[in-house]
Amino acid sequence: MTWSAFRVIFRLCTPLHAGWRRVGNTWQTRTYLPAVNLFKAVVARCTEKQIWFESGDEPNPYIRKQNWLQHRLLFTYFFPAIYHQGKYQVYIPGPCDRRLIEYMFLDCYGGTSLNHAASTALDGSLHYVEYIRPFARSLSKHVPSQESIDSYGNPGIPTLLYGYCFFKVQDSANGCSKGSSDVGNLLRQVLKNIQVGGERSSGWGKLTLAGDGFKELGEIPSDTSPAMDLFTVVNLGGPLARLYMKSGSPCIKVGGQEKKKEGYIPAHLKAEPGLVTIRGRNEMLYTRETITVKGRTQFGGRTRAIPCLAPGAVVQVEGDKHGGSCFRIEPVSCIWKHDSINS
């Protein structure tokens, strides 16, 4: 039983609304794509295209597909990025200034509902929807090339979404006995064109793989070998996290590298007693689950509220042989959990 890691870079083709909260008449977006959004989109795509297998006896095929994938597929969060002067720059809350991220990548769309009887806007229906721009605003003063002009004639740089996925390979139930190459080909097929987030009926949230956007990094090393670096990009000053196997599942280390005395967690971290070395902004993360009641499917029929620390939380080092603090990715929700708590 082994796991393989893949680096995934999407090109954002249309505006992306990764729902966060409502303030007044404005629906705010997150500045990143939560992993659960992508995981659910992959479940839907695999169900519709009949890729891989199913598990369980639920009447809903989407739930059966999720039951099979949740023990084999994990995603990190995906963060906005640009490709500049031959290098990727990834913008993650914490190590990067949030005001800079919002300026470069966020925009807002205003709209109303229609009063068809009066052929006018419906009173009191004015609202705004934030989104991540398909073209980032440039901070440089040079005149942009034609390739850096968006569909509205505004200068900008194509927006990318940068992250990782991990898949369990060489598992007797995988149907991929040839190893990670078969898994990689199927994953590339699934992720090549996918749609996530809100306002999808209006064409929002379309993602395609960038030119070199899908790269197999190989088998995740064991805890006795050098760890695999994650988010090694120029503007973050080195790897943000390191990946290795522990007790049969992927484990991620944050902090404790070189002379850095602290690190940043690029995901929601489940808030539990004992996180005394971690500080960050508290957030209640709400998730909706599809359930089956008396043979009938209820989409979003169950809501869970999970107390978390928002992405960008700061962790102090603990000083084990890998350095930093160890975290695991929970199935489906893909939020992180501190490995030393209830493990």
Image: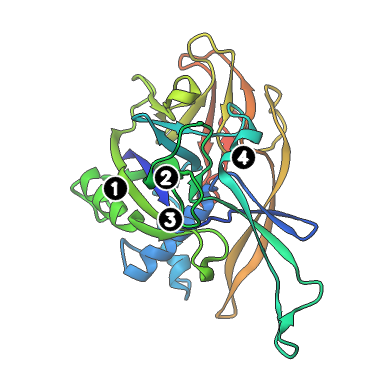
* Residue assigned mark 1: 171
* Residue assigned mark 3: 13
For the residues labelled 2 and 3, the Cα–Cα distance comes to 13 Å
Q: Earlier in the sequence, mark 2 or mark 3?
A: 3
Vertical relation: 54 (above or below) 35: below
Q: Earlier in the sequence, mark 2 or mark 1?
A: 2
Q: Residue 60 vs residue 285: left or right?
A: left
The foreground one among 247 and 194 is 194
Q: Contact (CB < 8 A) between labels 2 and 3? A: no
Q: Residue at x 71, y 86 (%)?
A: 119
For the residues labelled 4 and 1, the Cα–Cα distance comes to 45 Å
Check disc 4 and give the amino acid type. Answer: Tyr
* Residue assigned mark 4: 103
Check disc 1 and give the amino acid type. Answer: Asp
Q: How many marks?
A: 4
Would residue 188 be visible to someone looking at this image?
Answer: yes
